[in-house]
Amino acid sequence: MSATTVAGLRGIAVPEPKADRMERLATWFEAEQPALLRFAFFVCGDRAQAEDLVQEMFIRTYRSAAHVDDPSFRAYARTTIVNLSRSAWRRRTPTIAVSGVHIDPDPGDRDEVWRALLQLSPRQRACMALRFYDGMSDAEIAAALDMGQGSVRKHTGRAMARLREILGSAS
Amino acid sequence: MSIDDDIRSAFADHDDEMAGRAASWPAIESGIRRRVRRAAVVAPAVVVASIALLSLGAWNLVSRDTFQIITPAETSDTGFLILRQDGALELRDASGKLEREVLPADESMGYRYKLSVSRATGMAYFAVLNDAEDCGDRMFSVDIATSELREIGRGRAPAVSPDGRWLAYGSFTGSGSSAAPGSTCRTQGLRIDDLQTGQSTVWPTGSWSGASDPTLRLIPSLISWATDSEHLGYVVAEDHMEDQGRPAVFMTTRVTAGSMFTGPVPLPPSVRAIEFIRMVDADTARIVVVDASPGRRQYEIDPREASPAFDIRGHPVSGYDIDARGRWVLIASPNETSGLSGRVEKWSRERGAEYAIDLHAAGGSFGEVVWYD
């Protein structure tokens, strides 16, 4: 770990991020940012939160940035985004249905299926995005999210059941 | 248009929502810098604080199970025990190769069933069926290393805890068959013997509403311990009781003798009969239930949130066990066509049967199977 001293703390080493690691991460950031932002948006459904998720993901993955060229690093990044989104999702303000009145999370968006997708958990949305947007198979999704194929099938199956339930009750 | 097409369109309609937006690299750099500096201060502080607390005796570190991380490409190297249909008990290595016959077949002794093993003490337990009497089943222990066989009492479905100290089983008193005139046979419920001190606890189970004698208790017929040797699950009213209603799975602890949850574990509606149960771990309170109904589905259930998992694809199943780390499953399948051989498969719980081993028995079918280190 490189270190510098700062005014007022003379003689005390202040650790700094490794320059080569930062450089590699910055290069990867330029190349992967658009796809990761889109993925984060699909997972959380909010533009500002998607930016926050990607920023926080890069901060969290710094320690592993030496492996940024490893093919599995992209899976690690995606998994981190999903996990961060799950933490935020658990802290979310619950939607309350009053007397059967549906409260629209985004009144400007009239896409029924999209709204239904937003009611899924982040991990379910991640599986759905990779399957239906990126066209991945169960095995590819499992690799992309660093989980077992059984888990992928479980999350996808539950997501489809939930979507049918939501869309069925809406129609 | 199918729902699949609708979902594709929904994502495609929103894929340009982030166009023109960007995460801030300076903010990322600043965040990383803060994190690196904080780690340099916090980590040593935690170590110092921990040492201080330990030296003051403010807390005690209790031992915990260590869970080895197994990468997807790696298979378990654990051996296993097989109770064959003819009663022979075999020790096999991870590849399925026979290492030793622990007990020879002895059909005159009666049908051996419900194999359970303590990896900690090297003892295996099983019951011997007495068809003539409900209260006649006997239980035995066998030292796997020396093959020493010992009768330990009467009961059904013995299950020894992973630490080797506790023996749980369905117990009864008296003799005879419960429905026969003059019988003194009475089911007590779930009994737990402390193998160290000899003390016993009996927890009453529910009553059998269809019985002529309402004091008869439903006998726990399938029992499984969690890895902590404290929590356990059991089944009453398994397949033979199907006409009395659906089977019921309960989870409890030997410490408080009370149910962990109000009422039985919620089962998927399709489950009419249960072949096996296995506790996965105590922390998450999950249990695996293998449905004996046609189709033989396997469910992994969290009592707080019913969550069906993968199925076992219609295999006939006679034995089933999950390893101590909860990652690998052994399934013994009798060959119902020829009756001459059976199969043992090793499954990954996460990925299904990708790593199944095929093992055929010569001159006898496999019955039950358990992991054994």
Image (tube, helix red, strand yellow):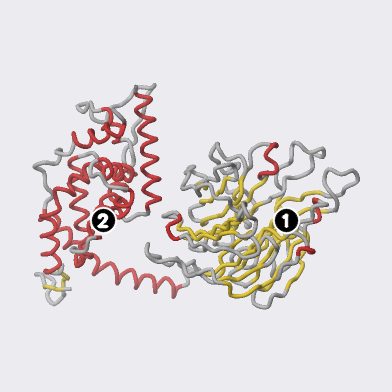
Specify the quadrant that holds the N terminus of chain B: top left
Q: Chain of mark 1?
A: B
Quadrant of the image occupied by residue A59: bottom left
Query: Residue flagged by tag 2: what amino acid is it?
Result: Ala
The Cα–Cα distance between marks 2 and 1, rounded to whole angstroms, is: 49 Å
Q: From the top left corner, tell me how far across and down residue B212 is, in percent.
A: 82, 37
How many badges with numbers are in the image?
Answer: 2
Specify the quadrant that holds the C terminus of chain B: bottom right
Identity of the residue drawn at 25% across and 52% down? A78
Quadrant of the image occupied by residue B333: bottom right
Q: Relative to residue B245, is residue A146 drawn left or right?
A: left
Q: From the top left corner, tell me how far across and down residue B55 is, in percent.
A: 44, 75
Q: Which mark is residue B179?
A: none
Identity of the residue drawn at 76% across and 56% down? B129
Mark 1 secondary-structure assignment? strand
Q: Which residue is mark 1?
A: B156
Q: Chain of mark 2?
A: A
Given residues A95 and B122, the one toward you in this image is B122
Given residues A171 and B47, the one toward you in this image is A171
Q: Which mark is residue A75?
A: 2
Identity of the residue drawn at 30% across and 26% down? A103
Q: Relative to residue B296, is residue B148 drawn left or right?
A: right
Q: Are marks 2 and 1 on the same chain?
A: no
Question: How many other residues sit within 10 Å of disc 2, few (<14), some (14-19) or many (≥20)?
Answer: some
Given residues A107 and A69, the one toward you in this image is A69
Q: From the top left corner, tell me how far across and down residue A10 is, in percent.
A: 11, 75
Query: Residue flagged by tag 1: what amino acid is it?
Result: Arg
Given residues A42 and B50, the one toward you in this image is A42
Q: Relative to residue B8, is residue A30 drawn left or right?
A: left
Q: From the top left corner, tell me how far across and down residue A122 is, in percent.
A: 31, 44
